[in-house]
């Protein structure tokens, strides 16, 4: 069975502070991991995927197979980063399994 | 707008009625997915099509639910004899067969009274 755990429902940080959104997964094979973001009143959109190893909007995420984690990080939070963030994985089937999401709130 | 579209965006129905939602994927995408999202939860997989073939169905998809993609383009999701527990956001996503990147529509919010 595949499972994604996001332990924090809400993460509140000050503008300019570092951000780390936690994601742990359970999967018996080699999964592909994603972070999706949903800004207020917008649709769910892909932020980044582990195989591309890109930095998008200053965010990065490294897949740690030993710890089965895929934490999302950004060194300096901006107000526009406030949104709902979902970690997701897919295995051999194409379906995505999502975590419950973390709301990031960036305050002045 | 060349993204995934869904219709209607909102649907209010009485318990026991049937409802049908439509999803139009990105035109060159041959994979189409349906998810359901309830308050405080992430999206949960319901079913998936590759072209017109329905390849996988979740246990969440009870007998009252049926999905079709007759010509491998748009898809419909029908819920018969709706129950209050069916109230949720129904999301559609599409992807190409070469990539696992799924692009989501805006969703249809169903409220069963």
Image: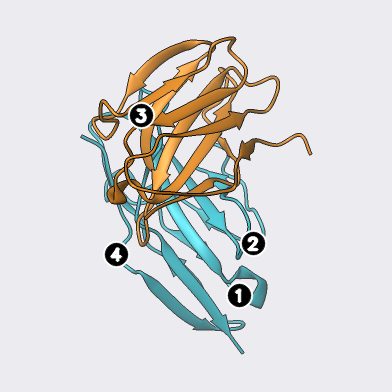
Label 2 sits on a secondary structure element that is: loop
Q: Kindly indicate the quadrant of the structure image that contains residue B19.
A: top left
The residue tagged 2 is A58
Please tell me which residue is depicted at 65% across the width and 53% down the height of the picture: A56
The residue tagged 3 is A91
Q: CA distance from mark 3 to mark 1?
A: 32 Å
Q: CA distance from mark 3 to mark 2?
A: 27 Å
Q: Earlier in the sequence, mark 3 or mark 2?
A: 2
Q: Nearer the viewer, mark 4 or mark 1?
A: 4
Same-chain check, marks 1 and 2: yes
Q: Colour of chain A?
A: cyan
Q: CA distance from mark 4 to mark 2?
A: 22 Å
B25 is higher (above) or lower (below) than A57: above
B55 is higher (above) or lower (below) than B100: above
Label 4 sits on a secondary structure element that is: loop
Q: Mark number for residue A7?
A: 4
In percent of width and height, residue A24 lies at 30, 53
- Labelled pair 3, 4 in contact (Cβ < 8 Å): no
Q: Which chain is orange?
A: B
The residue tagged 1 is A76
Q: Earlier in the sequence, mark 4 or mark 2?
A: 4
Q: Earlier in the sequence, mark 3 or mark 1?
A: 1
- Labelled pair 3, 1 in contact (Cβ < 8 Å): no
- Labelled pair 1, 2 in contact (Cβ < 8 Å): yes
A4 is higher (above) or lower (below) than A81: above
The quarter in which the C terminus of chain B is drawn is bottom left
């Amino acid at each position: 069975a595949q499972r994604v755990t996001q332990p924090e429902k809400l993460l509140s940080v000050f503008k300019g502070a570092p951000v780390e959104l936690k994601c742990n997964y359970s999967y018996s094979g080699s999964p592909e991991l994603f972070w999706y973001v949903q800004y207020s009143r917008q649709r769910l959109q892909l932020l980044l995927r582990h195989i591309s190893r890109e930095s998008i909007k200053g965010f990065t995420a490294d897949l740690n197979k030993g710890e089965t984690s895929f934490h999302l990080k950004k060194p300096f939070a901006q107000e526009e980063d406030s949104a709902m963030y979902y970690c997701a994985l897919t295995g051999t089937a194409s379906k995505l399994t999502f975590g419950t999401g973390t709301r990031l709130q960036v305050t002045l | 707008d060349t993204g995934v579209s869904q219709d209607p965006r909102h649907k209010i129905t009485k318990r026991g009625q049937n409802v049908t939602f439509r999803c139009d994927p990105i035109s060159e995408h041959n994979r189409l997915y349906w998810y359901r999202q309830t308050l405080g939860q992430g999206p949960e997989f319901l079913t998936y099509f590759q072209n017109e073939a329905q390849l996988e169905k979740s246990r969440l998809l009870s007998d009252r639910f049926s999905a079709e993609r007759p010509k491998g383009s748009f898809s419909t999701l029908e819920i018969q004899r709706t129950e209050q527990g069916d109230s949720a956001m129904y999301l559609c996503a599409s992807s190409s067969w070469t990539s696992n990147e799924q692009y989501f529509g805006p969703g249809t919010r169903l409220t069963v009274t």
